[in-house]
Amino acid sequence: MTHCILIGAPVDEGQRRPGCLMGPAAYRTAGLAATLTALGHSVEDRGDVTPAPPGTERCANPAVHHLPETIAWTRALTEATRAALPHGMPIIMGGDHSLALGTVAGVAAHAQAQGRAQFVIWLDAHSDFHTVASTTSGNLHGTPMAYASGLPGFDPFPPFPAPIPGENICMFGIRSVDPAELALMQPTEITVNDMRVLDEQGIVAPLRAFLDRVRAADGLLHVSLDVDFLDPSIAPAVGTTVPGGATFREAHLVMELLHESNLVTSLDLVELNPFLDERGRTAKLMVDLVGSLMGRKVFDRPTRSYG
């Protein structure tokens, strides 16, 4: 069984639609700890991370907003994630996806200290491959994977520790990529399993192929699960909905395959905006998916009534 370390990351500054800062409380209310305990895991809730007061950093791109706040969150979450990993599996409850600027930095620093390869599976509608210099929206939740890849254009962020090689990154379920992001991604060896690939090949073969690479390298695997990986018809509580996402069954299959691999060492839960939810429906689904990731089988799932 696993020692699960819950870390709240009430980050709201990486995009412009307020509400993600309520995410950690929603996960707690939806029973994340009880779900994990019922599966036999031990749970430690370290509360919500509090970043240092923001500095006065600036960048050349006038579109970027909340830069000092995001840098402060990045530093705090890098340390919180890195500090948790020797003691168990950190589950970072977000918060918008800019939190991954810190969490992925933290897991990469830990992997480097262990002398092991770090892998990332990015379950998201978006590639999040802008840099601070390239973003036109100015929303820094669209930058973590470019940062993790060690791309230039991130001044004045701290340098990313041990940038993750493209062959160690799998984007799974994406269906919305800006031209600038595509141009930055094309020279890399990132595996892009977009919805076209999944429609043609199914979920299982592409995911197992990536997991086989992680296993062969004796790697550590970070899973970053964005609510918008899911189809908005089943997960409405996100400010960045893109039609055509994973269905209930597809999402649970992904989680069960990840569990069976026994490779996952850390997890982000991001972009849940409870203000946009329907009676906790999305929060409960995300908790249910964590249950599948941590060992609940399809026939163990309870019947629920929303009436």
Image: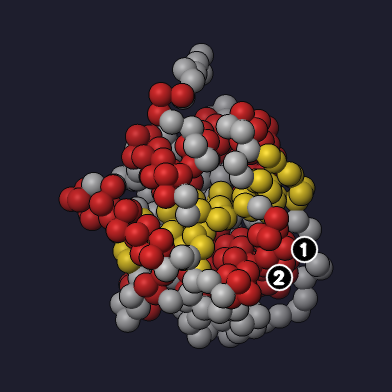
Q: Give me the residue at 58% from left, 32% from top.
A: 39
Q: Position of residue 275 (x, y in %)?
A: 61, 39
Specify the farthest residue to the left. Answer: 200
Between the residue at mark 2 and the residue at mark 1, the CA separation in whole angstroms equals 8 Å
Mark seen at residue 273: none
Q: Give me the residue at 48% from left, 74% from top.
A: 164
Q: Quadrant of the N terminus?
A: top right
* Any part of residue 254 in sight: yes
| Image quarter of residue 52 | bottom right
Amino acid type, mark 2:
Arg
Q: Give me the residue at 56% from left, 45% from top.
A: 272
- Tag 2 secondary structure: helix
Front residue of 278/217: it is 217
Q: Position of residue 303 (x, y in %)?
A: 47, 17
Q: Give me the residue at 35% from left, 43% from top.
A: 246
Determine whether, in the image, residue 41 is placed left or right of residue 137.
right
Give yes or no for contact between labels 2 and 1 (Cβ–Cβ under 8 Å).
Answer: yes
* Any part of residue 231 in sight: no
Mark seen at residue 75: 2
- Tag 1 secondary structure: loop
The crowding category of the residue bearing disc 1, from other C-alpha atoms within 10 Å (few below 14, some 14 to 19, many at least 20), is some
Q: Position of residue 176 (x, y in %)?
A: 35, 59
In the rendered image, which residue does mark 1 sit on? 51
Amino acid type, mark 1:
Pro
Q: Position of residue 70 (x, y in %)?
A: 66, 68
- Earlier sequence position, callout 2 versus callout 1: 1
